[in-house]
Image (cartoon, grey):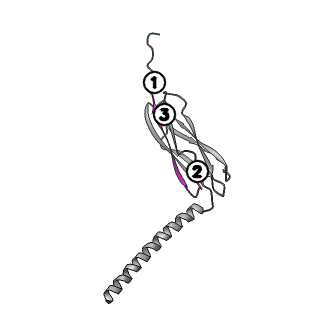
Amino acid sequence: MKKAILLSFAMLAMTTVGMAQNTTKASEAKTVANEDGAKIEFESETIDYGTIENSSDGNREFTFTNTGTTPLVITNAKGSCGCTVPTWPKEAIAPGESSVIGVRYATDRTGSFSKSITLTSNAVNAPKKVIHIKGKVNPKPAEDKNI
């Protein structure tokens, strides 16, 4: 009988500890969600160029909003290769304000592409945020040799 009581007590203790750990994780997640500070939210985190002509306009823009409570400062933006060049606002973005991250892809490169841009900021929800571009560039048109 004593063994059954001890076993029951041990099971109760393990269940209680497990539930306490889950409660702690849930409260930590709520703390991050409610945390004061700058927050970056994008209209879309991927831009699909679709199929485009060789050497066409490779400029696109990602629109984002600071949904936080303090100014958002983007300190760096880096493309995954030299063919993807980002530009970003150097001034702080006030809470509730929107701005854009510009990206220029080198459209003289034929074929499919999928590239990323990594942003570094003071956003409490995403201090390192990765956004993406993708698409396909058609080959250069064949030159007419009858001219």
Q: Give amino acid for label 2.
A: Glu
Disc assigned to residue 39: none
Q: Which residue is mark 2?
A: 41
Q: Give amino acid for label 1.
A: Lys
Q: Position of residue 96 (x, y in %)?
A: 67, 51
Q: Residue sitting at 50 percent across and 31 percent down?
A: 107
The boundaries of the magenta stretch are 121-147
Q: Which residue is mark 1?
A: 140
Earlier-in-chain disc, 3 versus 1: 3
Cα–Cα gap, marks 3 and 1: 16 Å
Q: Is residue 8 magenta?
A: no
Q: Which residue is mark 3?
A: 50
The reply to whether dot 3 and dot 1 touch (C-beta < 8 Å) is no
In front: 13, or 73?
A: 13
Q: Position of residue 62 (x, y in %)?
A: 57, 42
Q: Residues within 10 Å of mark 1 (few under 14, many from 20)?
A: few
